[in-house]
Image: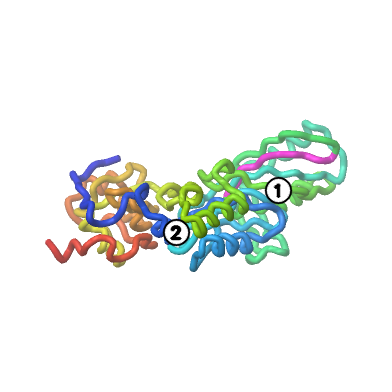
Amino acid sequence: MLKLADCETDEKYGTFPSKRTMEQMLACSIVIIDKPQGPTSHEVSAIVKRLLHAQKSGHAGTLDPQVSGVLVVGINRATPMLHYLSGSRKDYVCLMRFKKLHGEEYIKSLLASFVGEITQTPPKLSAVRKVARKRNIYYIDVHQIKGTDVLFSVGCEAGTYIRTLCSDVGKKCGGANMLELRRGEVGTIQEEMAVNLQRLSDAAWLHWNRHEEAALRSLLKSPEELITLPKMFIKDSAIEAVCAGAPLSIKGICSLDEKIKKGTQFAAFSQKGELVAICDSLEDATAIAGMRQGLAGRPVRVCMQRGTYPKGWATR
């Protein structure tokens, strides 16, 4: 981190994420669900909304009904933040069936030929436009081959259709189709972090009926825990202006990540570790560190509610 100023935070305003009340957590949290086969992603999101008495819910990265695994669900104010939390990489375990028998080495070589940049057209049942688009396959590891069935894991860019990948593989060898699919990772969010709907239901029941919040609290993730963007920590006096949509001034910065580059996005945090906003960077980190005045970034998604911190510009 590059330090620009010595900063202190006023305990009267804001809240350290670890000290948030259950009410505050339910107003802005992420739930990582282990989606079962059967329901749609929208149905799972609606179940989470109902269990947590939320006004709004949404999910990142739709899974087809027959696909299981990691589904990131946001509730209330965390819902519009999902785009910035889930990351661009997805990891799956897939069971594919060939229409013909093939040798092990041939199968491994064939799948390896799909690693790298590929071109895909979304399947007919997809809701997006059926336009060919480029996607990256980061790796394909074959775990088991039994007859015409192949079990493999694949890491890929968001927006990659594994069903289409299996179909494209089949076009080179006489046909293949996807039998089963499970998503194990979404960006930095791993399968071990996910909970099933029954466990969430039990924890929610304890909270709403017994006022026992420990179980539910352990299942709710704050956006701060999951954000992967480079970070910039700002002064208490700069927060309300950013929440109002104003550009972030150099004078409002305490410290920043060296990885911040001009034209990319960063996450602006309070000194207490609260996520304030997602911003477009106007300069590289090194350039910002050498500036005495000017603008460092513009908010594109405000995450903190206005009024959490006082108007710093009114007290100067």
Marks 2 and 1, how far apart in space?
31 Å
The residue lying at 83 percent from left, 33 percent from top is 103
Q: Residues within 10 Å of mark 2 (few under 14, many from 20)?
A: many
The residue type indicated by label 2 comes to Leu
Q: Is residue 171 visible?
A: no
Q: Nearer the viewer, mark 2 or mark 1?
A: 2
List x then y, in percent, for residue 149: 81, 40
In the depicted structure, whether residue 160 falls above or below residue 148: below
For the N terminus, which image quadrant? top left
> Looking at the magenta stretch, what is its main secondary structure?
strand
Left or right of 1: which side holds 227?
right
In magenta segment, residue 153: yes
Q: Which residue is more in the foreground, 85 or 140?
A: 85
Q: Is residue 5 visible?
A: yes
Left or right of 198: which side holds 80?
left
Residue, disc 2: 26
Q: Which residues are magenta?
A: 148-157
List x then y, in percent, for residue 6: 18, 44
Residue, disc 1: 181
List x then y, in percent, for residue 50: 56, 64
Secondary structure at numbered mark 2:
helix
In magenta segment, residue 17: no
Q: Residues within 10 Å of mark 1 (few under 14, many from 20)?
A: many
Q: Which residue is more in the foreground, 145 or 220?
A: 220
The residue lying at 68 percent from left, 50 percent from top is 162
For the C terminus, which image quadrant? bottom left
The residue type indicated by label 1 comes to Leu
Question: Mark 2 vs mark 1: which is more N-terminal?
Answer: 2
